Amino acid sequence: MQISKDITNVGANDRELKLFESQYVLEKGMAYNSYLIKDKKNALLDTIDERVTGIWLQNLEKVLDGEELDYLVISHLEPDHAYNIGILSKKYPNMKIVANQITFNMIPNFFDIDNLSERKVVVMEGDVLDLGKHKLQFIMAPMVHWPEVMMEYEQTEKILFSADAFGKFGTTDADEDWDCEARRYYFGIVGKYGTQVQNVLKKVSTLDIKTICPLHGPVLTENLAHYIEKYDIWSSYKPEDDGVMIACASIHGNTMNAARRLEEILKENKAKKVVVTDLAREDWAEAIEDAFRYDKLILMASSYNQEVFPPMEQFLHHLKSRNYQKRKVAIIENGSWAPSAGRCMKNVLQEMKEIDIIGNIITIKSKMTEKNEEEFNILAKEILK
């Protein structure tokens, strides 16, 4: 894919991959981007995943057209971007390797590269690599989402090579809305590191950016303010939309039946948006995405082994590990003889920041009663207030 006259995405789409990082469900595959800048000195920004090495090498050799590769810039050492560093260092023995010191400290964990000490070019914040017409300015982005991550700003064409930031699930040509899969990608992979993302956003806000080239997903060329605004919202943990997510972990169906009735009651009370998620059956990463998207969350779970049904336990663990905060949350438990789910859910919520627990824990004993119906109506009014 041609980015400009001198810059090409020589990466590849993996249309067969169904599980990214062995945990995130993919419906439309995954893109691995690798950018070649041709100039007086030719520079490649990152390699790609093992699964699509063959296509990538063909693309690279075709665009180089017999010329040497002078530099390999390593933005991120995670194997889906760095698998081919060893192969490339052997194929182009005169190629210099450009990275920050943390990257060079980590490289021996993955590769044995001949003459690395003579080939390495260590860069720091603000350093510029002069390729001729094109000049790469380096921006350190530690913990977005590994400690060695850095971005590159090409000063001539005003392109930000953003590493994993602004990436998404899906191939480069996937016909789908960017926001949804970028949101699921962000909170799944980068969500824990909101403070670090905010720090990088402050750095790049001073740059005149015309194009964003991430390592996953499509190249972004229009309405860049929209994508940057989304990252600002996500990384500051502010709710994105006014709505209620009902996260339900039901064993035999009674808790889910109650969730569906609560959905109806919320809509009767003019809730702008209500989303019900079956934590036992639906994609957990989608559930995490929705929890961060909306400003209100209702947890509904069955009791299990004097604790809480495991799908809810896992959901709360994922929320906590991603710094879930700044939300209104209500708790509804189900238990036929010794309800315990509510206590377990509340204990986890109390370990999170700025969580406003609405009302008391509502208890269902097996199936809904008229009393529960009344409690749901009170809760709906309270959480929508």
Image: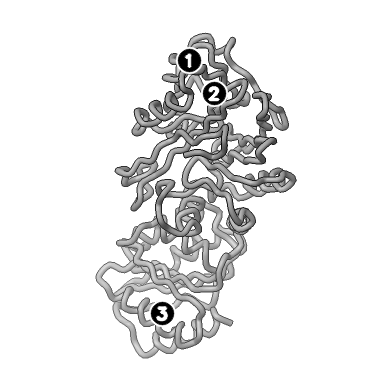
Kind of element beneath mark 3: helix
Residue 219 got which mark? none
**Residue 340 visible in rendering:** no
Q: CA distance from mark 1 to mark 2?
A: 10 Å
Can you identify the residue that label 2 sits on?
Answer: 72
Kind of element beneath mark 2: strand
Three-letter amino acid code at disc 2?
A: Leu
Sequence-first disc among 1 and 2: 2
Kindly report which numbered mark, 1 or 3, lies closer to the viewer in this rendering: 1
Can you identify the residue that label 1 sits on?
Answer: 92
Q: Nearer the viewer, residue 275 or 6?
A: 6
Instruction: Report the label total.
Output: 3
Sequence-first disc among 3 and 2: 2
Are circles 3 and 2 on residues that touch, CB within 8 Å?
no
Residue count near mark 1 (Cα–Cα under 10 Å), binned few <14, some 14–19, many ≥20: some
Residue 59 location, quadrant: top left
Which residue occupies 53% across, 33% down?
A: 76
Are circles 1 and 2 on residues that touch, CB within 8 Å?
yes
Q: CA distance from mark 3 to mark 2?
A: 53 Å
Which residue occupies 41% across, 79% down?
A: 263
Residue 263 got which mark? 3
Q: Nearer the viewer, residue 80 or 371?
A: 80
Q: Relative to 299, is 379 above or below?
A: below
**Residue 274 visible in rendering:** yes
Q: Percent from the top left, x then y, of residue 329?
A: 52, 70
Q: Relative to 195, is 245 above or below?
A: below
Q: Nearer the viewer, residue 363 or 241?
A: 241
Three-letter amino acid code at disc 3?
A: Glu
